[in-house]
Image (tube, rainbow, N blue to C red):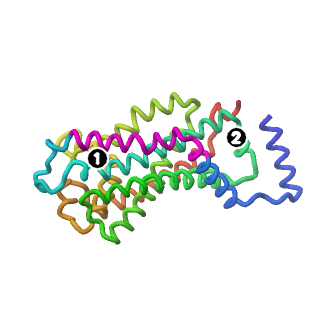
Amino acid sequence: MNDAVEARLAEETAAGTPAPSGWLAAWSLGLREWLRFVRQRNRVVGSLGQPLLFWLFFGEGFRETFQLPQAGQQLAFREFFFPGVLVLILLFTAIFVTISIIEDRREGFLQAVLVSPVPNWALVLGKLVGGTAIALVGALVFLLLGLTLNLQPGLLGLAGTVVFLFVSGLGLTGMGFILAWRMDSTQGYHAVMSVVLFPMWLLSGAFFPPPPGVLGYLMLINPMTYAVGGVRQMLYWNAPELAAASGDPPLWLCWAVTVGFCAAMILVGGWVSRTRTKGDLR
């Protein structure tokens, strides 16, 4: 069936039928992701509700026991944990958005896009930018809670935080795109989330600074460590001594790793989208 459709599209293209605009297709796919997300309230609640509960419960539970020796009593656990929750929102939203790839394949929508004259890059761009926009909006809504904390970003730090969250969200959505593309079931994707994605966040410096030993080395090679560290240093732009007490990598290194990770995920996502799985032949 797919061969017949591809042959017909090839004949129409050879006959002079104009190909659709790749930018318009990317915009349409991105808008579809946005509408699909906001209409499913369970996804909206899941992407924002669980990180909020984590922040409230863990923040209260560790309030009396958490202390950074370098920062004394100036940095409470809720403030230390806040950047990690922002990255968690990006991660959860990326998971909820890219899981639609599996659903689209099951419903036949993805196969229709793949055999259409739409450029392959439009599919990748639409999915990634649409998902990142959703993640960024959720993170910015949660960022308003920072007004209740002793954060000191300033205007420059706040603008840098928004840009950094966008780059981090684009990389995480790209990673979710790559994982979801090879999956044929949502159950398999949830298993990967539990075994790979969630442990990556736990070892990102969101809960504790990098300790000596094996855990410290694992955190150094974890790209989420640099996402959390970059957000934390942006939020304490006017109080660098508090950010330094968290033991995060230098800000320039956080930018370099995060931008490099984002670029790598986009390139790999474009390559993966050219491959076919068994689900595409159904």
Q: Using the numbered discs, state the Cα–Cα distance from disc 2 to disc 1 in whole angstroms.
A: 38 Å
Query: Are there few (<14), some (14-19), or many (20+) residues within 10 Å of tag 1?
Result: many
Q: Which label was assigned to residue 109?
A: 2
Q: Residue at x 48, y 55 (%)?
A: 137
**Type of the residue with mark 1:** Ala
In reply to whether residue 60 is colored magenta, the answer given is: yes
Lateral position of residue 254 relative to residue 103, left or right: left
Seen at 16% across and 45% down, the residue is 66
Q: Residue at x 79, y 38 (%)?
A: 3
Q: Quadrant of residue 240?
A: bottom left
Element carrying mark 2: helix
Q: Position of residue 30 (x, y in %)?
A: 61, 53
Q: Residue furthest front?
A: 148
In the rendered view, would you say 140 is above or below 215?
below
> What's the residue type where badge 2 is placed?
Phe
Count the numbered circles shown.
2
Q: Which residue is mark 1?
A: 206
Looking at the rendering, the stretch of residues picked out in magenta corresponds to: 36-61
Q: Nearer the viewer, residue 190 or 272?
A: 190
- Classify 10 Å Cα crowding around label 2: few (below 14), some (14-19), many (20 and above): few
Q: Secondary structure at mark 1?
A: loop
Where, quadrant-wise, is the C terminus in this rendering? top right
